[in-house]
Image: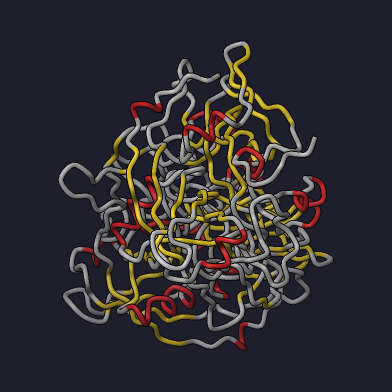
Amino acid sequence: MLRTNKVRLLKMAVMGEVVHPWASSGYRTDFDGKPRIGLGMSGVKYNVSVGDLCFGYAEGEHVEPGLSISNKDEHENAALGVLGCIGNEVTAATGDAKGAKGFITGKHGNFLVWFGPEDQEKINIGDKMRVKAWGVGLEIGGFEDVRVNKLDPELLEKMGIAEEGGRLVVPVTAEYPAYIMGSGYGMWPVAIDYDIQTTCPEVFDELKLKDIRFGDVVALRDQLNWWGRGYYEGAITIGIVIHGWSNSAGHGPGVTTIMSAKPGKIATKIDPHANIAYYLGIRKRPE
Amino acid sequence: MVAISTNRDKLMRQALLGKVAPPKMLVEGGLIGGYVTTWDGRPKIGIGVGGIKYNVGVGDPCLGWAEAEYLEPGVSLLGVDDGAEMAFVKLSCVGNEATVVDGEAKGARGVVTGKGGTAATAGHVFSHFPEADLEGLNIGDKVRVTAEGVGLEIEGFDGRVFNMSPGFLESLGPEIDDGVLRLPAVKEVPSHAMGMGVGGAPAESGSWCIQTSPPHLVEGLGLGGLRIGDLVACRDILMSYGKGYYRGAMTIGVVTTGGSDIAGHGPGVMAIAASKKGKIEPRVDPGANVARYLGLGA
């Protein structure tokens, strides 16, 4: 079992509300100059959940699974954005689903939240959601040079991570090279995800990008997400896939980065079921 | 190889109005905030965006300036109001004439040398004016840009060109052979060195950074000698209807700003030509810089 400083981490309430889907007033142009509608950001998705494939939704663009929450006050939203972590408990604070509980599953512009299907049926746009934010400052004992980000301490403990030879061995579904990382590059890992680009057909076949699922734990090679987000030869970043496919140049499934270190501190082990849907008990892990 | 022919006689020429942009901080902090955090966790002030630079122009080094981030060369311009800002950026092209229309420097003539796009440089157009005219120029002075270049096409080229006047394109000595366009560039930059800006706007606005951290990346690729205004060839990079990776593609761009110490950031590259099918062949020339092509004596 990993040792962490979780007893020293503040656990606090932050608020969001379920946000309405939005659309632009015209087509968005894809990487190849084709007009597309592009839907799937914000709102409540009844048939897209953590554990599902990221690819293949009609006119889908950055599809967010489950429901999406944010806070309409700029400053409060900034706090929600920094404090909320993947795996944090979310409670419906108002509306017909009041008292229902779910989890944060990703941080895009919005936070993405999973609720059980019966509870989700009762949720309306505008319902208030209380997030029990917990995780900022999380460190792993003996691995203080591994930066942990936006990860609930109890989810960390469920990810099957082992200590071997001075390294953390993390189960992942796949590894991706630096050149394929797209939009969100250079941005602040605490605030936003970055995308695995799905707009070069040759590469998405070669890297099997159509197999990516919401909730997959993946490794990014030669990527350091520490004080910022950039290239670093030999570094490894671990992230969780949070949103869907894109046809816009430089975009694709988003990755919230949860661990990152310079060379020699993180190793990976391929596990096709390394997905938070299993770790959080949302789905039953196949034998 | 033969000289190119273009549709330059079909391009609209029109007046744009901008103003000399005020200096701008990357981070507007209060009390104990206010620093940029570098890739290795150091606080940095981050100056050089906006304003009038008396001692930095196209042809000068990208790196090494004290406390600088995204250093913009010469005189930075901005659209006169929010409604005009996007048109000002999208229509301005390298090589367009810029004329001061009010203030003490009224009548001074300069030239557009590049455009910003990434982070705090968004909306900025960079211009060069003779040193003597800079003395009379103030922040906020109005500048007219005679825009010409949007829609420029090269006959027989399987790709797109952007952000340059027909005259600037011709000054590059472009040649075409069997659909392959030859353009000068100081060096090639591989896709893994490209950072912030990926996924951004179509090629007519915005830029895409060449990462200038960590040091092993800069040393390994010889990026330390890059100059503002250099033409670079970005392999497997497609800046066209957006900015993304595309294997086999080639984009030629102008390095329009100085470097950065923020992870994933660095000198911004503004595209001038791109081919999804790789129908561009860079002609390596260490002197391929906007300053030379515009006759600015650097």
Q: Residue at x 48, y 47 (%)?
A: A186
**Residue B285, position as x, y percentages in the image:** 61, 48
Task: Name the image colouring.
Answer: secondary structure
Left-right relation of A157 to A200: left
**Residue A136, position as x, y percentages in the image:** 38, 37
Give whichever of A8, B219 is nearer the camera: A8
Q: Residue furthest top?
A: A165
Residue B178 to residue B61: above or below: below
Q: Residue at x 59, y 55 (%)?
A: A116
Q: Is residue A193 visible?
A: no
**Residue A55, position as x, y percentages in the image:** 73, 59
Q: Residue furthest right?
A: B178
Give whichever of A91, A233 is nearer the camera: A91
Q: Is residue A21 visible?
A: yes
Give whichever of B209, B176 is nearer the camera: B209
Q: Residue at x 53, y 74 (%)?
A: B165
Left-right relation of A118 to B83: right
- Quadrant where the N terminus of chain B sits is bottom right
**Residue A2, position as x, y percentages in the image:** 52, 20
Number of disc labels: 0
Residue B114 picture quarter? bottom left
Residue B98 picture quarter? bottom left
Give whichever of B11, B30 is nearer the camera: B30
